[in-house]
């Protein structure tokens, strides 16, 4: 049994900086990651970084294909997809090497590769890659083990070659016809990406709208944009079975009391993500999880066991890299600097990296209604975004929710070029308690996208 001050399980966007900060503070720390290939976590290796690299390449290809709207003719466009993949792999590898270098150079820090699980309340057993087992104990344990792609139970799926969000990024060929099951942000991002690379893409979901957590008008606006670009959708679809004959995959589903079939060459299944807590043997430590397997924590990210914390996706809630990093900030500040940080009231942004992006911050209209708040909704159509017209970049709805009693911004959704950046501007206004009416007259550079915030908030009565 090896005694440490802190044990960290997982080197993601909370575990990695936490390990460096604790060790710099003099804590004898061990960081456990399943394999060297996953150092840096999901985001670096199989999530944000590789997907956004390929999405950026797809955008370049789309820009070239549609350059005629600027009066620029490009007779023929081709892609060396192997070179595209190698570019992605180089960036991912360099990122992972950077993480490893920083960890190895940190004092008081041991980096261990292997599968971790609880063997007692404050003890962790690690099955190393060489087959040997090592055991650690510490008064403080931090779980940042993340999530993995979820699967679906579909008849005959075991007899079909299919991909999850990790596997689809490793393809060395561009699918001729790609069927995507799932219309959340992952399905939309990857569906549009492969469509721009040249695939025929069909997205199928049992939900009545894409991005089921979003407001109906936001979802409808983005779907219309994607359909105009060539993607096809089948919503309210109950999937019955999937079959493969040679290279052809047939998906059978029912919709409007009719059975339908679509055929493709590749199948992507992205119904969401599943907690990795089921491999940690939480019961040996008495740590509680909810019915979906996510570790229960309080507003300070503490589990029901004193000294044990859960950070990032494994605790449930919004599953974004920036949330995991903010979890690290809260925990490290509270422990090392005796602050009283909390997840209560934090303003959460996220971005769907379609093109145009969907930037969201704070409450949606749907959420404000569920909370029975006294609010008003303002929105403008994309045709009013001057910078978008000048740049020939398609824009969707810009929308904000404003508290009628205080005049403060409750939330916003921006479908537009760099919508995530626009939502961040609104987030800063919300954090600073700037009244919504002040954004009517803020001086923004002309011509910029941010200037259209004047237009949006001028809709306030």
Image (cartoon, rainbow, N blue to C red):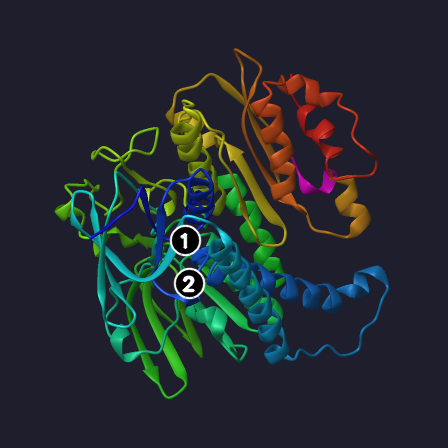
Q: Position of residue 440 (x, y in %)?
A: 72, 22
Main secondary-structure element of the magenta-colored stretch: helix
Residue plotted at (51% across, 55% down): 105
Name the one closer to the observer, 190 or 146. Answer: 146
Magenta span contains residue 382: yes
Residue plotted at (50% across, 19% down): 375
**266 sits to left or right of 282:** right
Look at the picture and state if 389 lies above or below 374: below
Q: Secondary structure at mark 2?
A: helix
Q: Quadrant of residue 409?
A: top right
Say which label, 2 or 1, has the lower sequence index.
1
Residue contact at pointers 2 and 1, CB within 8 angstroms: yes
Name the one closer to the observer, 70 or 44. Answer: 44
Circle 1 residue: 11
Q: Position of residue 416 (x, y in %)?
A: 65, 45
Circle 2 residue: 38
Residue range (magenta): 380-384
Q: Pointer 2: residues within 10 angstroms few (<14), some, or many (20+)?
A: some
Kindly tell me whether residue 34 is visible in this rendering.
yes
Q: CA distance from mark 2 to mark 1?
A: 8 Å
Look at the picture and state if 237 lies above or below 414: below
Check the image and name the residue furthest to the right.
71
Q: Position of residue 49 (x, y in %)?
A: 54, 59
């Amino acid at each position: 049994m090896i005694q440490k001050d802190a044990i960290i399980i997982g080197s993601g966007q909370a575990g990695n900086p936490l390990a460096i900060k604790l060790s710099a503070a003099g804590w004898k720390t061990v960081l456990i990651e399943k394999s060297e290939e996953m150092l840096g976590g999901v985001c670096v290796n199989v999530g944000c970084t590789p997907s956004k690299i390929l999405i950026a390449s797809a955008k370049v290809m789309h820009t070239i294909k549609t350059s005629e709207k600027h009066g620029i003719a490009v007779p023929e466009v081709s892609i060396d997809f192997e070179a595209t993949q190698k570019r992605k792999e180089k960036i991912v590898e360099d990122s992972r090497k950077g993480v490893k270098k920083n960890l190895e150079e940190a004092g008081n820090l041991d980096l261990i590769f292997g599968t971790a699980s609880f063997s007692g309340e404050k003890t962790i057993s690690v099955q190393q890659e060489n087959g040997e087992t090592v055991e650690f104990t510490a008064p403080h344990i931090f779980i940042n083990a993340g999530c993995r792609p979820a699967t679906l139970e579909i008849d005959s799926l075991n007899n079909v070659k299919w991909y999850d969000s990790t596997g689809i990024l490793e393809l060395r060929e561009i699918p001729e016809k790609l069927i995507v099951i799932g219309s959340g942000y992952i399905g939309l991002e990857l569906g549009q990406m492969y469509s721009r690379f040249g695939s025929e893409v069909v997205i199928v979901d049992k939900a009545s709208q894409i991005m089921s957590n979003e407001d109906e008008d936001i979802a409808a606006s983005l779907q219309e944009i994607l359909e105009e670009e060539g993607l096809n959708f089948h919503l309210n679809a109950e999937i019955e079975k999937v079959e493969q004959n040679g290279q052809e995959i047939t998906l059978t589903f029912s919709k409007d009391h009719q059975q339908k079939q679509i055929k493709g060459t590749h199948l992507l299944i992205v119904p969401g993500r599943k907690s990795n807590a089921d491999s940690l043997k939480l019961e040996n430590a008495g740590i509680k999880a909810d019915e979906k397997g996510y570790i229960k924590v309080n507003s300070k990210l503490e589990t029901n066991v004193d000294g044990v914390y859960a950070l990032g996706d494994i605790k449930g809630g919004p599953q974004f890299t920036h949330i995991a990093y903010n979890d690290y900030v809260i925990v490290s500040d509270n422990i090392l600097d005796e602050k009283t940080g909390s997840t209560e009231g934090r303003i959460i942004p996220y971005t769907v990296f379609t093109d145009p992006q969907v930037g969201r911050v704070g409450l949606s209209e749907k959420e404000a209604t569920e909370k029975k708040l006294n609010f008003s909704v303002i929105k403008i159509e994309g045709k009013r975004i001057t910078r978008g017209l000048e740049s020939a970049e398609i824009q969707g709805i810009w929308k904000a929710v404003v508290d009628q009693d205080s005049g403060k911004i409750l939330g916003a959704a921006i479908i537009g070029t760099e919508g995530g950046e626009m939502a961040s501007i609104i987030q800063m206004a919300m954090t600073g308690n700037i009244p919504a009416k002040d954004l009517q007259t803020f001086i923004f550079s002309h011509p910029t996208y941010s200037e259209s915030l004047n237009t949006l908030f001028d809709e306030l009565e």
